[in-house]
Image: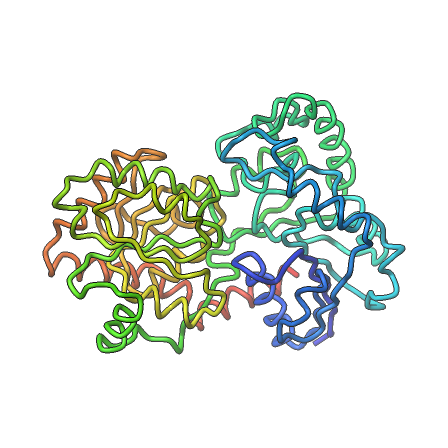
């Protein structure tokens, strides 16, 4: 075997997108090749080999912080996750060249929002004369700036000048930057890999990725719980006592890194709960896992009990808290994952979700889940009532089907096959 060297570029190796890159990194090393991760210096405390932590210069850092802190100056209130292109921590190889490995065969690019510019990606490809593999953890590589464009199709027109996420005074600027981004990325030797079937259509429409090779690998970057079983009932009851949940409560879990993010659909959940009859609301305990503000918690109807735990980066802890759920609700309106939906299914938890991201690949309506009509609080409320009304035999069948639907693709054996197939592409 000829040993190859790979450079993985990402803003972060935390969260779902970061874990996907970290897992790919480890898979390459396990295959007997060299792998390096180029990322921000605050990721260096992650226990992994060959992490090159970069510290941005102060001016770029302060500019990025300003844009993100005072985003209301530039962005319209919306569900879109938009990052203004042109604001990057790293735009040139000159300042980081001394940290780079000598030889690289291929470069894999993950989430780079506000971090590595398109010119940086082009320059590093030229430096090593290496193909770029775009790992689609979001859509930021193929749009004018949106990580998740939702239903917006402006990025297909080569301009993004009518972007609904930004204020009008910026639109000509965005148009010029999108044309510039296309210039840097379109002609690179590049391939796109994705673990979400629904993303293939967007990849085929963007002028940046149109005509490029696209490889769909189900479960790419998946999280494997081969050694973690659903905890025994005694353990689950202990968790309930710890966060003061009554034994007979119907526990609905809503989890996200930032629950307040409009893309995660919290407002649809609030509206749907208001539609439930009082006798149904009385049975529910709503468990939030992630960052949420008090002003949002008080929007929940008063007769629904709520509990909150912070976002859990430790997957074992996350697994334990999810295990007490009777229903997991995921209302993302655009997503490559969400990863937590898969973790919940591996825990034999039924799902209520829109048909978005990998949910589109794994959910079967009224078999392992309730697939709600897109952005419809009425349909979400119907889904909650559906699960409240199932008898014990029916709910156990849904639980069994939930785990069964994802167990093969996210098993240790299948994931090894996926990464073996990926290595043939690389």
- Residue 234 occupies quadrant: bottom left
Q: Position of residue 383 (x, y in %)?
A: 23, 43
Q: Position of residue 110 (x, y in %)?
A: 64, 54
- The type of colouring in the image is rainbow
Left or right side of 153 for 297: left
Q: Position of residue 299 (x, y in %)?
A: 34, 41
Work out whether residue 290 or residue 94 is closer to the camera in this orientation and state it: 290
Number of numbered callouts drawn: 0
Tell me the quadrant of the picture where the C terminus can be found.
Answer: bottom right
Can residue 211 be spotted in the picture? no
Can you say whether 98 is above or below 337 in the image? below
Left or right side of 325 for 414: right
Q: Position of residue 172 (x, y in %)?
A: 72, 23
Tell me which residue sits at (55%, 28%) in the image. 153
- Residue 422 occupies quadrant: bottom right
Can you say whether 204 is above or below 303 in the image? above
Can residue 288 be spotted in the picture? yes
Tell me the quadrant of the picture where the N terminus can be found.
Answer: bottom right
């Amino acid at each position: 075997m000829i040993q190859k060297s790979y450079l993985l570029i990402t803003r972060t190796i935390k969260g779902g997108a970061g874990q996907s890159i970290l897992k790919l990194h480890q898979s390459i090393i396990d295959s007997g090749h060299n792998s390096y991760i180029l990322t921000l210096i605050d990721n260096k405390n992650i226990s992994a080999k060959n992490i090159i932590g970069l510290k941005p210069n102060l001016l770029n850092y302060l500019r990025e912080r300003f844009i993100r802190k005072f985003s209301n100056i530039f962005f319209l209130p919306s569900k879109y996750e938009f990052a203004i292109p042109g604001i990057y921590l790293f735009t040139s190889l000159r300042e980081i060249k001394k940290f780079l490995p000598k030889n690289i065969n291929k470069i894999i690019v993950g989430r780079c929002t506000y971090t590595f510019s398109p010119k940086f990606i082009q320059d590093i490809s030229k430096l090593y004369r290496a193909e770029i593999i775009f790992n689609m953890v979001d859509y930021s590589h193929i749009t004018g700036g949106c990580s998740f464009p939702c239903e917006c199709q402006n990025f297909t027109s080569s301009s993004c000048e009518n972007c609904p996420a930004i204020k009008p005074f910026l639109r000509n600027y965005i148009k010029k930057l999108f044309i510039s981004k296309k210039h840097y990325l379109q002609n690179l030797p590049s391939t796109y890999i994705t673990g979400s079937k629904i993303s293939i259509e967007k990849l085929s429409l963007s002028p940046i990725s149109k005509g490029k090779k696209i490889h769909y690998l189900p479960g790419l970057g998946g999280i494997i719980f081969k050694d973690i079983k659903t905890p025994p009932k005694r353990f689950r009851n202990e968790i309930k006592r710890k966060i003061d949940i009554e034994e007979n409560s119907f526990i609905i879990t809503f989890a996200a890194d930032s629950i307040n993010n409009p893309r995660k659909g919290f407002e649809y959940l609030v509206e749907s709960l208001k539609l439930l009859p009082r006798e149904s609301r009385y049975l529910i305990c709503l468990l939030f896992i992630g960052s949420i503000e008090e002003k949002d918690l008080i929007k929940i109807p008063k007769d629904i009990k709520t509990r909150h735990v912070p976002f859990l980066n430790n997957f074992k802890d996350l697994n334990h808290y999810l295990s007490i759920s009777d229903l997991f609700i995921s209302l993302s309106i655009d997503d490559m994952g969400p990863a937590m939906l898969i973790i919940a299914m591996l825990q034999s938890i039924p799902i209520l979700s829109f048909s978005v991201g990998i949910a589109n690949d794994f959910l079967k309506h009224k078999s392992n889940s309730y697939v709600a009509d897109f952005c419809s609080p009425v349909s979400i409320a119907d889904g909650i009532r559906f699960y409240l009304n199932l008898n014990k035999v029916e709910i156990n069948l849904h639980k069994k089907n939930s785990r069964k639907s994802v167990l093969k693709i996210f098993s240790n054996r299948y994931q090894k096959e996926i990464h073996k197939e990926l290595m043939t592409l690389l």
